[in-house]
Amino acid sequence: MTGRAPIPEDAAGPSGRRRLCVYNGGFLTQKRIRRILDLAGYDVRIGLPGPEDMIGIWGRSPTAPRGERIAHRRGAPVLRIEDAFLRSVLPGRIGAGTGGRAGSPPLGLLLDRRGVHFDSSAPSDLELLLATAPLDDTVLLDRARDATRRIRDAHLSKYNNFDPGIPTPDAPYVLVIDQTRDDASITHGGAGAATFRDMLVCAQVEHPGNRIVIKTHPETAAGLRPGHFGKPDENRRVSLIDTPVSPWRLFECATAVYTVSSQMGFEAIMAGHRPHVFGQPFYAGWGLTEDRNPVSRRHRRLTRAQLFAAAMILYPVWYDPCRDRLCELEDALAQLEAEARAWRDDHRGHVAIGMRRWKHACLERFHGHVRPLVHEDDTGRAVALARAEGRDLLVWASRESPDLEPAATAAGLRLRRVEDGFLRSRGLGARLVPPLSLVLDDTGIHYDPTRPSRLERLIAESTDLPAASLRRAETLIERLKTLGLGKYNLHAAAPPSDLPADWPASEGRRVILVPGQVEDDASVLHGCRTAGAARGETEDRQEDDGVNLGLLARCRAENPEALILYKPHPDVEAGLRRGAVATADALRHADAVLVNADPVALIGRVDEVWTLTSLLGFEALLRGCPVTCLGAPFYAGWGLTRDLGAVPARRGGRHGAAKVGLAGLAHAALIDYPRYLDPLTGLPCPVEVIVERLASGETGRQGTTGRVLSLLQRLRGLLAR
């Protein structure tokens, strides 16, 4: 950890831990809070404090006076605890009726030995940081700027059960932020109910003729706690917005922001505003706000990056629930991004159409965590049900019927196609090993170049990624290379023992790896424009020997002196899918057939990869190996591959300089496009967690049903030969 130490050295006991006596049941019943405190070095207990003990109090909660009285009588120091400023997807007090769960546990805590950040009557640890810490470290400030942009781009806030796609009021307008009545940040921040009335009057007077938009607090909109404004406050100039819109969208169109003490005021500063502040929140008084009720002891002038660095990097204690450890802000952001994306994708619920039965449990884990999935095989009934219940439609991409998209469009429904991600599992999908990643695509699907896909858009947009995102992708690439990870991660022996130990040097020839593919794979059927291209056909070919043999023939025809190594597809080797090539036939064009070899391990020992549309081409690019494509996989056409097939002109990379970098391609394909599910905790997670699980082998077990179905699938493959 490079942030502030959770326990100052002079506060820890001889063992480096400190007993924390509490008098609020939430510390005992909320497992996440207790775990964070435990990892931070505090042993939560009930009872009176001893000489070395502290008393834990939740902010300024109703139970706080009890702990304060005991602390005063016993002379014990107090640790005040609050949620961090990026808390969770759902608020902690939202009930099961709003999303299937009783709120969400926090991703971080604020542990303060001096006070509470929202109580302006006395300095807190945060105020001391803001007033006295140097805040001039270049690395720290760069992290602050990078994280600010990341939070804005991902539309993250304290609570995240909102949809960034919901439109905001027409610009321009003045944004007035409401809060719940009797909120502690109001009563302890030099304000009251009358302050909100003053704020609304000032917003109207100071911006004559401008529209005023009042943002209702989410808990008020949910009917949990009353706010300060309601329908009687609306008129021709003033309107309320209580829909779950992104605060960052509201800031984009606002000409001014007015707040009492809401955290949205802090976010407004990060969005580039200079908010008018009528209370005394932690972010006021540092030269970044228009203060109507200034805190007299705050005189320092800070930049936005300095304010963010203290409040978001140095002050909180962040927690990684998948790895069960304290972490840096960046890791907490990655986790919150994954959880928020999952909620935003799935909160309306889905009708899953025509899904194979063995996939039901996996799909439920990925997409049924908010509302259980409804499965339906008939298109008409599925569309009617989705429209009646306000759900979206899910379909496995390769099983989409021609009438589904027109029916969904006519009904005004969102249709998304599902497929495995590119870091899938330790084991074959054809053996019914459940995936650790899935993709959702509402535009097309990545293996079909005849139409745009969401992945294609993400790749094109990767040229505008910030430097921090590219560094993350580069780190991911290096990690995959070091660990030898790919899609299935079978880790078979490679190369086979019948090849020279020092190949290819002993041959003195350029070595080309040709990965076989499943004959009827969707990426082959869609990614090769013509039957001839799908067979790798050359002009002098007369016979039809199938996809894989045709690819080998094309490769040999254009590389007569090369050492060509053929690696059959793992599903084909296992007898589960079509595409087998007799060894004798393969050796008409190849120098060796590498059976049961690890294709990822082979990449580092060849000079080039030739493929139609295999994902191995993408894995080769990540490892710096040149790739020639005869088809149009998602990674072709961007200037990173040699393309002999017909790639979409909209990608623009075939005849010009590469516009898309390797890190941008990796970010789109491995970070932005898929969703990942941690097999140990069942939580949505970032790709880095899945990389660790694949490397360690902690990927869960295939159930009995899956094993039985896998045997039946293998028998079916053998009979189909």
Image (tube, rainbow, N blue to C red):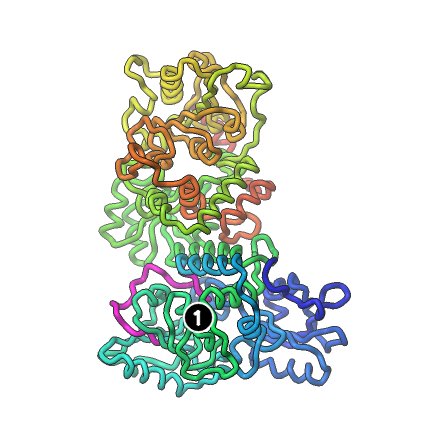
Left or right: where 108 falls relative to 448: right
Which residue does the image show at 39% across and 19% down from the upper left? 555
Q: Is residue 42 magenta?
A: no
x and y, in percent, of residue 355 in the image: 39, 43
Magenta span of residues = 155-176
Q: Which residue is denoted by mark 1 in the rendering?
A: 266
Position of 319 relative to 488 (above/below): below
Position of 605 relative to 252 (above/below): above
Classified by dominant secondary structure, the portion drawn in magenta counts as loop
Q: Is residue 156 magenta?
A: yes
Quarter of the figure that contains the C terminus = top left
Mark 1 surroundings within 10 Å by alpha-carbon count, few (fewer than 14), some (14 through 19), many (20 or more): many
Q: Identify residue type, mark 1.
A: Phe
SS for tag 1? helix
Residue 376 visible in rendering: no
Residue 493's quadrant in the figure? top right
- For this rendering, which residue is in front, 389 or 313? 313
